[in-house]
Structure formats: structure tokens, C-alpha cells
């Protein structure tokens, strides 16, 4: 036997226990960027998918695989890709699907960063035309000129308009465009767009899937033949997430059903109370019968209508500040989807880059607020809002 290694070598090699005969109840975090191979045949077998194994942290480890498998299971899809953020899922899909001279048709009501990313792709020769996704005739007219992609949000952020995903999917297929749906506000708890005819679904797991305001993570899901080349691009461009984020997402999704059952029921109750409040000029919630997309919401959503609503005060920043100052628990936080109820002010955040006129044209004035409803007792949320509104 060779001599015991020196101190420097023992420091470098570290130590590890023998492999146990049993498994931990929770999947451990594969915090390793590299994997050990016993032979070149083993390298070939793992590369070619003939043996289970991992190659490199950036090409996915057990935590990514587990998160991706759960996304497939919840969406009823063939394949999924974990990404560093919701926006990197979009970027990876666009890098693969849209090239110079190609045209995208997108809903006018899109998350601000998605619109800006589509503008960024303009410099690669990708042109985007925007339509009102609730006007099926307008979408059909836009798709009659050849387009590679139709992009909509199931429930739009922040105006909470619901797209008729099934009708749009059939139309995109007929007119030769792939159909990509951003399902972030709905999550698979309320909508499974693949089952309604979408080709690709984006989830920002930063929001309700993560659910606790503590991760930034995304996912893209669809057919194997679409996801495989996008996965290769995403790995090459480093659009991948850390294993800890995927691990946290699995922990969080375990409670998705109970969290959203509570918060979506609370949202409807809160929307009804706000709709009667004299200080509130308008309430936007997919489950209100008076809303412009209620019929689409009934077609597209199940298990309720989501946990995001918007309401309008007079267009006056000082009124908003009086509300914020008088709220006991609800905080101004410019993201959403956590277990606590939060408010956002799109005019100074997601829609900040637009001119006041452009904001007014889409109804995002200084009195427009987005409420993300958490899992607190709904009567406490309502009492807090009523106390805040009394100060407006
Ligand atoms: C937040 C959000 C995104 C982007 O997600 P990130 O994880 O922040 O990159 C995309 N779409 C919608 C609708 C969002 O709300």
C-alpha cells in the first residue's frame, strides 16, 4: 500500500461517507459542476443517453431533472427545460424559433420585459406585430401574413385579461404559426395550455410556482422535438438555473394546490368587496362576471380565476401613498406570487419606461394597482385594504 497522502493532499481530496443503502426522503442538492467517469465507454454511454448520468452542472443534474419532470407531469407535456428565469425561457425559445426576416405576432397585453425582449430581437431582424388577443378576428388577420410564432399570456400582467387559449391554438395551427403561452399568472393549477393546443408554455417560477419571494427561476415546456434543440441552445448560452433554485421550486410546488386553492378563493371575495368600494373606480379580476374576458376565463381557467387582481383609484400618486401608509400588513413589492399579499404599482415599475400618454392609452395610470393575494385569512386582507382605502 502506498504511503498515506500528505496534509496538502488530504486537504484537497476532502472526505465523503460510503454510499448509503437507503435514500434521503428529500432529493439532495447536486452542488457539483462536474461528474466522475470510470471509463471512456461510460462517457459515451452517458452522452448518448444509454446510461443514466450527468456530465456538467450547466447541462443539468438531478435537481433540474426532477423539476422538469414535475413540470411535465403538471402540464401533461412531453419535455421541459429549467431556466435561470422566466425571461431566459423566452430568450431560449426565441433564439431557436425566430430568425432574420421572420415575424412574431404577440398580444398587446404582455408583461413589459417580454415586449422589450421582442424589441431587442428586432436587431436580429425579427419583426413583432401586436394585436388585441381577445379579438380573434384581429389575431386571425395578423396571422394571415406568415408568422413563425403567436405569443399570448393566459392571464395578462397586469390587466388580468384572459386569452381564449383553445381558440387561439386552433387558429395558430390552421394559419401555420407555433403558439407560445406565458402561463405565469395561471400556473398549471388554473390552466394547462398544452392540453388546450399550445406548442410551448413559459412559466416564471419566480412567482406562484416558487411562491415565497425567494427564487428567480423559469421553465419552458412542450414537445420533445421542440424542447431538445432549445435545451442545447440554453446550455450553450448559459441560460440554465442553479440546482438550489430547482430544489427550492420542488419544495414550493408541493404546496401549490393548497396555496392557490386558498388564495384564488380569497381573490374572488376581495374583488367583490373592492368592486363595491366608493374609493375604487374599477376592479379587474378574471372571475368577475362583468369583466371583458369573463367568457374566455370560463373556457380557459379551472379551479377558480387566479390570485392576481388589479384595481384603480383616482390617478393620483399621493392617493396611492396614503393607501400604502395606512396598510398594516400588505406591502408594496414589485413582484408577486408569494404567500403574503402584496401590492404593485405598474406605472412606476413594469411600465415605467413608457410615456405617460402611452401608459394612459392602455389604462395603466398613476392610480392603477396590482394586488397579489397570499394565503392569509381573507378577512384580514379585506380589513387591511378597507383600512388603507379609508385613508385615501
Ligand atoms: C415575472 C414575469 C415574467 C418574467 O419572469 P422572470 O422569472 O422574472 O424572468 C414573464 N412573464 C410574466 C407574465 C411575468 O409576470
Image (spheres, grey):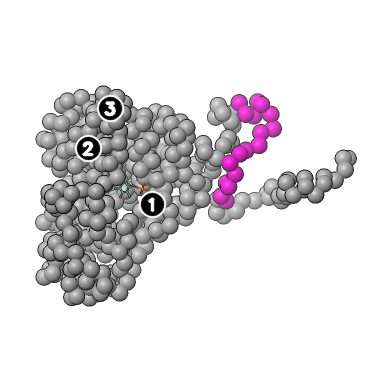
Q: Residues within 10 Å of mark 1 (few under 14, many from 20)?
A: many
Secondary structure mostly seen in magenta is loop
Is residue 283 placed above or below 235 in the rendered structure? below
**SS at circle 2:** strand
CB at disc 1 and ligand 1 closer than 8 Å: yes
Q: Does the magenta run of residues contain 40?
A: yes
Q: Residues within 10 Å of mark 3 (few under 14, many from 20)?
A: some
Quarter that holds the N terminus = top right
Distance from the alpha carbon under mark 3 to that under mark 1: 30 Å
Residue 200 image offset from top left, x and y in percent: 33, 36
Pick the front one: 174 or 366: 366
Residue 233 image offset from top left, x and y in percent: 43, 31
Residue 212 image offset from top left, x and y in percent: 40, 59
Report the magenta residues as a range.
Answer: 28-44
Disc 1 designates what residue? 206
Q: Is residue 3 visible?
A: yes
Pick the front one: 235 or 68: 235
User: Reading the chain from its start, which is encountered first: label 2 or label 3?
Assistant: 2
Q: Residue at x 42, y 29 (%)?
A: 229
Quarter that holds the C terminus = bottom left
- Front disc: 2 or 3: 3
Query: Image quarter for residue 49?
Result: top right
**SS at circle 3:** loop
Amino acid at each position: 500500500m502506498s504511503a498515506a497522502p500528505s496534509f496538502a493532499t488530504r486537504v484537497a481530496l476532502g472526505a465523503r461517507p460510503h454510499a448509503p443503502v437507503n435514500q434521503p426522503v428529500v432529493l439532495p442538492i447536486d452542488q457539483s459542476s462536474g461528474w466522475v467517469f470510470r471509463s471512456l465507454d461510460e462517457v459515451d454511454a452517458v452522452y448518448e443517453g444509454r446510461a443514466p448520468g450527468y456530465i456538467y452542472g450547466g447541462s443539468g443534474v438531478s435537481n433540474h431533472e426532477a423539476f422538469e419532470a414535475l413540470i411535465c407531469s403538471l402540464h401533461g407535456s412531453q419535455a421541459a427545460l429549467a431556466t435561470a428565469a422566466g425571461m431566459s425561457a423566452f430568450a431560449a425559445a426565441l433564439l431557436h424559433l425566430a430568425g432574420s426576416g421572420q415575424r412574431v405576432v404577440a398580444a398587446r397585453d404582455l408583461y413589459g420585459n417580454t415586449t422589450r425582449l421582442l424589441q431587442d430581437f428586432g436587431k436580429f431582424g425579427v419583426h413583432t406585430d401586436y394585436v388585441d388577443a381577445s379579438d380573434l378576428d384581429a389575431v386571425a388577420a395578423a396571422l394571415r401574413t406568415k408568422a413563425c410564432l403567436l405569443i399570448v399570456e393566459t392571464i395578462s400582467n397586469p390587466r388580468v385579461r384572459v386569452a381564449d387559449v383553445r381558440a387561439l391554438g386552433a387558429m395558430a395551427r390552421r394559419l401555420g404559426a407555433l403558439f407560445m403561452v406565458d402561463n405565469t399568472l395561471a400556473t398549471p393549477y388554473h390552466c394547462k395550455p398544452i392540453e388546450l393546443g399550445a406548442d410551448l408554455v413559459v412559466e416564471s417560477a419566480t412567482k406562484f410556482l416558487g411562491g415565497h419571494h425567494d427564487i428567480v427561476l423559469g421553465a419552458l415546456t412542450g414537445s420533445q422535438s421542440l424542447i431538445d434543440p432549445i435545451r442545447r441552445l440554453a446550455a450553450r448560452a448559459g441560460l440554465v438555473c442553479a440546482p438550489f433554485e430547482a430544489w427550492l421550486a420542488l419544495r414550493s410546488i408541493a404546496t401549490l394546490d393548497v396555496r392557490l386553492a386558498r388564495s384564488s378563493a380569497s381573490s374572488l371575495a376581495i374583488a367583490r368587496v373592492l368592486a363595491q368600494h366608493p374609493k375604487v373606480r374599477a376592479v379587474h379580476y378574471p372571475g368577475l362576471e362583468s369583466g371583458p374576458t369573463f367568457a374566455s376565463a370560463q373556457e380557459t381557467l379551472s379551479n377558480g380565476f387566479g390570485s392576481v387582481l388589479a384595481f384603480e383609484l383616482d390617478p393620483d400618486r399621493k392617493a396611492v401613498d396614503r393607501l400604502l401608509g395606512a396598510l398594516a400588513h400588505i406591502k408594496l413589492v414589485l413582484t408577486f406570487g408569494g404567500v403574503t399579499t402584496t401590492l404593485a404599482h405598474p406605472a412606476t415599475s413594469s411600465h415605467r419606461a413608457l410615456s405617460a400618454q402611452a401608459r394612459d392609452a392602455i389604462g395603466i395610470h398613476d392610480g392603477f394597482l396590482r394586488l397579489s393575494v397570499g394565503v392569509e385569512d381573507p378577512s384580514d386582507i379585506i380589513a387591511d385594504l378597507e383600512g388603507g382605502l379609508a385613508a385615501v
